[in-house]
Image: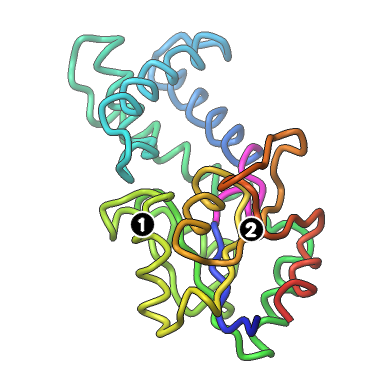
Amino acid sequence: MMVNAVLFDLDDTLYPYSPCRDAGLEAARKTARKLGYDFDRESFDEFYQTGRLEVKRELSGTAATHERFIYFKRALEERTDESRPSDALALGDAFWESYLEEMALFPGVEETLETLQSAGIDVAITTNLTTRIQLAKVEKLGLEPYIDLLLTSEETGREKPGSVMFTLPLARLDRRASEAVMVGDDVRADIVGANAVGLETVLWNADPDESLEGRRAPDHRIDAFEELTEVVL
């Protein structure tokens, strides 16, 4: 197989997600306390989950299902029985500001992207979530020089594993599925979705005990990001 394009997931594929989420939540909690809400970590987590679960239930399958401003807006409405837009904005801003500050690439990502670029291979990021925050993440991580395309689920109206999240970036790059590889950490979103449209798939940074059979099985599994070059080149 000659590889001419590599599609990457973003969150928990090019950088570790959990430390960023945790930093964002702690910053939002401190902001809430400054605004007069009496939260310890446990009660703030319950408050946050109230908004998150409501949004996940009502907006499933859309980019908005990941948006923390909506989580905080809904959680505040549930807690106070009022609309408090300025507080929701403050909590969302605090979350994303600290989230972005915490971001750092996984070891080997930058070097691998440089290698792909030097080999003339197109690089795209195809990611669930809203466009503005994903653009901010790409900027914070310094990825702009290494990518040819960023596509978000907000742009397509569909979340991975929807086929358009894989076929549209290929169309924009003028590449066929038979000459492309998808790299991601989420079996359902990245591997199943890409397998369904004929991309070769690479699973990285996933639960080592997760069952990988049938359409859930990736073509390759790597334990260090640098191993991707052995698959692609």
Q: Nearer the viewer, residue 204 or 90?
A: 204
Image disc number at residue 14: 2
**Residue 26 lies in the magenta stretch:** no
Judged from this view, the residue extending furthest toward the front is 214
Front position among marks 1 and 2: 2
Image disc number at residue 50: none
Is 65 left, or right, of 150 in this rendering?
A: left
Is 146 left, or right, of 112 in this rendering?
A: left
Q: Nearer the viewer, residue 17 or 28?
A: 17
Mark 1–mark 2 Cα distance, whole angstroms, equals 18 Å
Percent of width and height locating residue 136: 45, 59
Q: Which residues are magenta?
A: 10-18
Dot 2: what SS? loop
Q: Which residue is mark 1?
A: 132
Question: Which of pointers 1 and 2 lies earlier in the amino acid sequence?
Answer: 2
The amino acid type found where label 1 is placed reads: Arg
Which image quadrant for residue 226?
A: bottom right
Which image quadrant for residue 164?
A: bottom left
**Residue 14 lies in the magenta stretch:** yes
Percent of width and height locating residue 90: 36, 34
Image vertical order of residue 120 relative to residue 17, above or below: below
The amino acid type found where label 2 is placed reads: Leu
Dot 1: what SS? helix
Percent of width and height locating residue 215: 56, 48
- Give the residue displayed 36% in from the left and 57% down from the top: 132
Total count of labels: 2
Q: Quadrant of the N terminus?
A: bottom right
Percent of width and height locating residue 173: 42, 82
- Give the residue displayed 66% in from the left and 47% down from the top: 16
- Give the residue displayed 54% in from the left and 82% down from the top: 122
